[in-house]
Image (cartoon, rainbow, N blue to C red):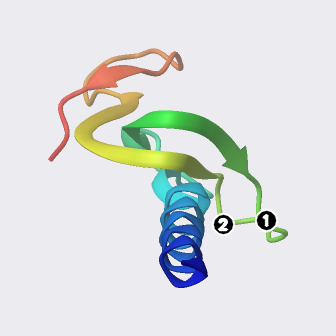
Amino acid sequence: MKKPLIVIIIIIAVALTIFLYPKDAGGTCGWCPATGVHKIEYNCIGFKYEYNPQCPDCGIEIKCIGIVTGQKKCYGIPEGFNTTEEVEIPCK
């Protein structure tokens, strides 16, 4: 009687561990070029946060606790524009 309950608890624990483990959901470049893609971000079903590694040229890593979807967005400065404001640009 206790064996099926233990198996169910183990399955739930493993599923929660997989679901709650932080997964990569994009990031930024450390020292970015003047134009081009500066940030790549994937959608996340769950909680998204930014992790800043302790090195000057690593950039910010975006992590997702939940499920990372395949929808990808890129932000940066398009070539040929004289602006410093980052906008959504096509991903290459």
Q: Nearer the viewer, residue 10 or 20?
A: 10
Q: Secondary structure at mark 2?
A: loop
Given residues 24 and 2, the one toward you in this image is: 2
- In this rendering, would 56 be left or right of 61? right
Q: Amino acid at mark 1?
A: Pro
Q: What is the distance, in whole Å, between disc 1 and disc 2 at their CAs?
A: 6 Å
> Which residue is rendered at x = 85% and y = 69% of the image?
54
Q: Which residue is mark 2?
A: 58
**How many numbered discs?**
2
Residue 26 horizontal/vertical position (percent)? 45, 50
Question: Callout 2 environment at 10 Å: few (<14), some (14 to 19), or many (20+)?
Answer: some
Q: Is residue 82 above or below residue 10?
A: above
Amino acid type of the residue tagged 2 in the rendering: Cys
Q: Position of residue 8 (x, y in %)?
A: 49, 69
Farthest front residue? 1
Q: Which residue shows up at 37% across the image and 47% down it? A: 68
Vertical arrangement, residue 15 with respect to residue 75, above or below: below
Residue 9 is left or right of residue 42, and the answer is: right
Q: Disc 1 designates what residue?
A: 56
Q: Are marks 1 and 2 in contact (CB under 8 Å)?
A: yes
- Pointer 1 local density, CA inside 10 Å: few below 14, some 14–19, many at least 20: few
Q: Where's residue 92, x and y in %?
A: 14, 47
* Residue farthest bottom in this picture: 3
Q: Position of residue 48 (x, y in %)?
A: 60, 38
